[in-house]
Amino acid sequence: MKRNAKLLRTLSAVAVIGLVCLGLALHTGTGTPSAWGIYDIAALCPLGAVEAALAGKTVVPPMLIALVVSVVLVIVFGRAFCAWGCPVPLLRRLFGLKSPEEKRAKREGGVLDIPDSERGGVADSRNWILGGTVLSAAVFGFPVFCLICPVGLTFATIVALWRLFQFNEVALSLLVFPAMLVIEVVVLRKWCSRFCPLGALLSLVARLNRTFRPRSDEEACLRSTKGEPCHRCADACPESIDLHHPETSAPLNECTKCRACADACPMHAITLPFLPKRDVIPVEVVEDERANR
């Protein structure tokens, strides 16, 4: 997996789209990531579930199932969906586009210069848009963001194309949905880091995530072993996370487990263990401390 994470992320996103198409072909009723189900179990996108609950001022089992399942998955895997399941990065790669975050290499003294708006918290514009999203659903009685969600638009376009070829059904959505996707993916290049309320919701829940977090082995890292000012891992991270300078970095709850940092490290010093190993204090250090008391 060391050098193939980018390929695996692409295949993972394609597999999600493939499963949706397979469901359409076989009429399994499994749906899409926006609304999925298995037999009598149905669930919604977690943000869509929150919007629907506020819009309808009621809570139904599919909404609770979606929230519980999503919270558990995010606690275990963090924001992995953003890198491994969301179609937006896949569309960017297909169009040969890079987000501004992937192009950034601004440094001051070897440290990434991360804007406050990308470090989470009150300054994060995504959190404000998340608040506006849930508020608009409550005010208008309708999940407004679902109309422009790029995940929903992607699969709605696929469904529209499927109906075109299967039933010769021509609809305005064949023009409207792709046009909105182009605006969000091509024009709004900072969609993921500045606008996406789903990413904001996942980031808030991911504050509880303690598994599969990237860690640097200081015994292998060039910075600690040879004193070289290597910062390839921070440059490669699309979420602006710098493992060596957490004080100026985006927080680890923004990590999408994409493994870009691990792939970029020439010494293979970065791993994403299920649980971090406890730091073991060498016996010599303990004995020296006792002798100095």
Image: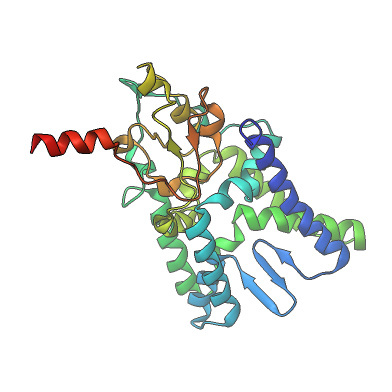
Q: Is residue 229 visible?
A: yes
In the image shown, does 30 or 275 lie closer to the viewer?
275
Give the quarter of the figure containing the N terminus: top right
Q: How many marks?
A: 0
In the image shown, does 288 or 11 lie closer to the viewer?
288
Give the quarter of the figure containing the C terminus: top left
Q: Residue at x 50, y 45 (%)?
A: 273
Q: Residue at x 46, y 46 (%)?
A: 213
Residue 228 in picture, x, y percent from top left: 38, 16
Q: Quadrant of residue 147?
A: bottom right
Q: Is residue 176 visible?
A: no
In the image shown, does 85 or 2 lie closer to the viewer?
2
Residue 21 in picture, x, y percent from top left: 81, 57
Residue 159 in picture, x, y percent from top left: 78, 59
In the displayed structure, 278 sits above or below 242; it is: below
Q: Residue at x 48, y 82 (%)?
A: 57
In the displayed structure, 162 sits above or below 284; it is: below
Residue 115 in picture, x, y percent from top left: 35, 36
In the displayed structure, 115 sits above or below 177; it is: above
In the rendered structure, the answer to whether residue 109 lies left or right of residue 41 reads left
How is the model colour-coded? rainbow
In the image shown, does 99 or 281 lie closer to the viewer?
281
Q: Residue at x 53, y 33 (%)?
A: 262
In the displayed structure, 82 sits above or below 146; it is: above
